[in-house]
Image: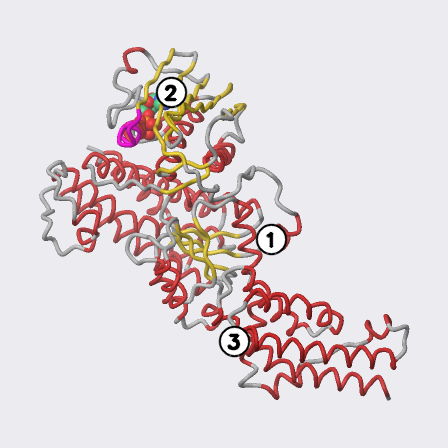
Amino acid sequence: MKAKDLLFQLSRMEHSLQDFSFEELTSKEAAQLKTIFETFKKNLESKIFQPSIPVSLKDENEFLENEEFANSKSPEYTDSNMLIAKVSHEIRTPLNGIIGFTDLLKEDEDLNHQQMERVNAIQKASYSLMEIINELLEYSKLSAGVETFESVPFNFRNLVGDVIYLCKTLVSDKEVNLNVEIDKNVPATLVGDPSKLTQVLLNLLGNAIKFVEKGSIEVSVQSELVDKNKTILKFNIADTGIGISEENLKHIFDSFKQAETNTYMKYGGSGLGLSIVKQIIEQLGGRIKVTSELGAGTTFEFSVPFEVSNAESPVQTTDILSQVSAKQKDAVSGMQVLIFEDNILNQRLIDQRLKAWECKTYITDNAQFGLHVLANHKIDLVLMDLKMPGMSGFEIAKLIRSFEKPDATSIPIIALSADFSARDKEECQKCGFDDFILKPYSSDELLQKLVDNKRDTSITVIEASSSINSKNNKTEKTQIDLSGILEECMGQVELLEELMVLYKQNALEFIGNVRLHLENSDSKQIGFAAHKIKSGLKMMQTVTLLEIVEQIQKCCNSDSDLKHLKFLYDSFLEEYPIAEKAIDKAMDELRK
Ligand code: ADP
């Protein structure tokens, strides 16, 4: 059924590849792209042309061992559903590889104009194919009733803010006004499945944007409180687009149906979006209806019940478009970030955000591709979704930590998870993660995490700790310039001598205090001690010590991991005599 579309996309891609001169390119990426394409093509052909492939639940296939499918003995999980799910799932991974490698090819400065056009064509076709495959997978899971729905607290206004942020990037080249109005009675925190609600909104708004060239799209949300723990949200999405005829309106929620026969050629799409939207809404206990007039516009109305959370909002309401501090943005600008994320919506969202802060992004759910990027690019930070198909985030993190490229083993890795249990936290530490972010997170939160984990500070700490093995080497390198502080002492060396005594006293006090508070596991007091010594270290320009102390402070303000604090404290102890020697040497110079 959808084989036609898949093959159509495939032959478009194949056509582009045929014209593509891999010989001229001689790049490693081109060879990998070719291999991965061939694997993909073979997979697709074997699945499509052998519809009778065994799909028994006993199949030793990795996919079928996947929990959600292994448990899918539902009678509704028909062979055709199973086949669609299997095909979609297996095609996604190599296809992700194709998309990723074409991204890398585009960076190749040797590509001429024609080659670039072909790479773009391959990528465009791959994206359409990916969209169809994702929808097929979602559709088959929903139809079989094996799709799982989350129940987690989420900040409703943040969610809508994210969706609108993404949609605004889609209307940038159109004369379309996109407005949202959320009634003030809508509770701040709801309990439900935020990613499914996002999917519904993005699908409906994505269609509206597709079918409005010039005009407006109005979104409104009202809340009808059932009792103090439950509310029904009523959404209304009205556009002034091309509209749908009365005849076509009757079948609009049917699967694989597009209103006009030429819709696919003109607008793309699989005709599955609305059917998925309807299934999600109904499985959430809601209803959807549509009214439309050809040439005038279309209105979708839907309602969904949600539990109301009385707990504090998990993420503070922030306007997604609000300007984050320029200083923070400058700090991350130019960073190269590798993101492992399988959810297509999250991929888009994270990509938009990072690009807005002028970061370079590499996004994938394909471990092989991610490691390739890591080996060949100067990656500054990794964001890692913990739950991914195939290899989990934990496993990929372990691989990164044991990577041959020495630089990669110390790259900060931040875990992304909607559901972070204590066990996950422990596992994260074991696998070498540096930090984590709970989903859904605000744009400001993400930016803060990038700033906090930016590598230059952690490298210094690693240098400091490695100084254990190369102390002499380090002592030679550490030079302290006291001219600035001497100027502040109006050139009086005696005054500087007095300051120096105070500095050393402070440092010893700090060492003693932290030892004591580490024994008492009192991170609050450790943070306080770190705060106190900071100005002295700044004044003496003992950069490495200052950075270690800043890390201590950061650790006390976040997870207060005592093991890490102890490590930082040891680094300080190692580094302190080296810095002291350098200061003494500089003082000697001044006294001459
Ligand atoms: P597709 O992926 O093809 O967009 P959908 O199920 O989302 O599939 O939509 C099915 C068809 O419904 C579309 O192809 C289009 O013809 C029609 N349609 C959906 N939303 C709108 C809209 N807002 N305005 C006009 N036509 C729409």
Percent position of residue 278, x then y: 29, 27
Q: Indicate yes or no: mark 1 CB to ligand 1 under 8 Å.
A: no
Q: Main secondary structure of the magenta part?
A: helix
Tell me the quarter of the picture where residue 483 sits: bottom right
Which residue position holds label 1?
333
**Marks 1 and 2: which is nearer the front?**
2
What is the distance, in whole Å, between disc 2 and disc 3 at their CAs? 62 Å
**Side of 257 where 313 appears, left or right:** right
Disc 2 + disc 3, Cβ < 8 Å: no
Residue at 29% in and 52% down: 389
Q: Which residue is mark 2?
A: 300
Q: Amino acid at mark 3?
A: Glu
Which residue corresponds to the image point at 46% horizontal and 28% vertical from the top-left? 186
**Residue 263 appears in the picture as rendered:** no
Magenta span: 278-286
Q: Closer to us: mark 1 or mark 3?
A: 3
Total number of numbered labels?
3
Q: Which residue is mark 3?
A: 519
